[in-house]
Image: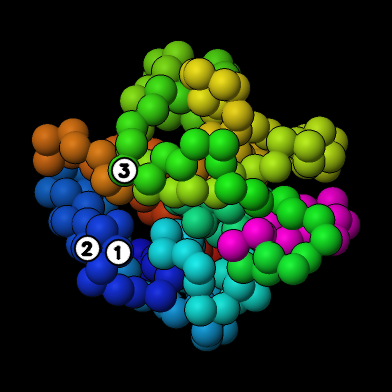
Amino acid sequence: MRIALVGDRSPSVRSHVRVPLVMEALREHDGIALDPYWIPTTDVTGLDGFDGVWLLPGSPYRDEAGAVEAVRVAREGGLPFLGTCAGFQHMLLEYARHVCGLDVAHAENDPAARDFLLTPLACSLAGHESLVRLAPGTLAGRIMAAPETLEAYVCSYGLNETFKEALTAGGLLFSGHAADDGTVRVAELPGHPFFLATLFQPELAERGDRPHPVIRAFAAAVARHAAGREVAARA
């Protein structure tokens, strides 16, 4: 079960350091042995050969176009997809451009652009924890099995809320919002095998030695995809 860890790997990014520990915890406690491959944003060719794509934090990426392309491949190819922090931001960017037809930019990547989909948060969440309210009946709500969850962040950019209606009209579902001001924290795509992105970083969660429920759900979706691929190969 091969998964692509898309991001520009660095020992200075705490999320990247935590991922191997998460992989080991999945093996030991969930019986899911994922085979992770780090893929730089500068070369995302061949992603359709993986069983899942995780677009990890670490912005600004070396290649915005590569990060966006990774999202597109997973979305159009039905590959389980998880985006966290910058992965959340670039998932929204891909969907806005390729599905909703919006000419928008990320303020961190292109400060000279005209219209920004991703803008600085009113208050940076870097190094903070904050409550997220989850919509019942959504993928995120079912995964967490709770109306709200306390999550860790290392980010300073989020969705420009003026585009929320356009993205919703285009089919994207916002299933998690900040408990204090109602701004978007989780997005998902109904009808896709697994397509979920969070502004928070579940890989940083301290839950003993168990992976965060979002990561466990992603891993389970990867396992289902790999099993389906194997069945198809035998047919």
Q: Position of residue 30 (x, y in %)?
A: 22, 43
Q: Position of residue 14 (x, y in %)?
A: 26, 58
Q: Work out whether residue 170 or residue 90 is closer to the camera in this orientation and state it.
A: 90
The residue that appears at 84% across and 39% down in the rendered structure is 166
Marks 2 and 3 sit apart, C-alpha to C-alpha, by 16 Å
CB-based contact (under 8 Å), mark 1 and mark 2: yes
173 w.r.t. 218: above or below: above
Q: Work out whether residue 114 or residue 52 is closer to the camera in this orientation and state it.
A: 114
At label 1, the amino acid type is Val
Screen quadrant of the C terminus = bottom right
At label 2, the amino acid type is Val
Q: Work out whether residue 110 or residue 91 is closer to the camera in this orientation and state it.
A: 110
Residue 142 in sight here: no
The residue that appears at 42% across and 54% down in the rendered structure is 222
Task: Kindly state the secondary structure of the residue where label 3 is placed.
Answer: loop
> What is the span of residues highlighted in magenta in the rendered image?
93-108
Left or right for 221, reference 10:
right
Marks 1 and 3 sit apart, C-alpha to C-alpha, by 13 Å
Marks 1 and 2 sit apart, C-alpha to C-alpha, by 7 Å
150 w.r.t. 190: above or below: above
* Residue at mark 1: 13
Task: Kindly state the secondary structure of the residue where label 1 is placed.
Answer: loop
Left or right for 57, reference 75:
left
* Residue at mark 3: 127
28 w.r.t. 17: above or below: above
Q: Is residue 37 found inside the magenta-colored segment of the image? A: no
At label 3, the amino acid type is Gly
Q: Where is residue 42 in the image (x, y as percent from the top left)?
A: 52, 84
* Residue at mark 2: 17
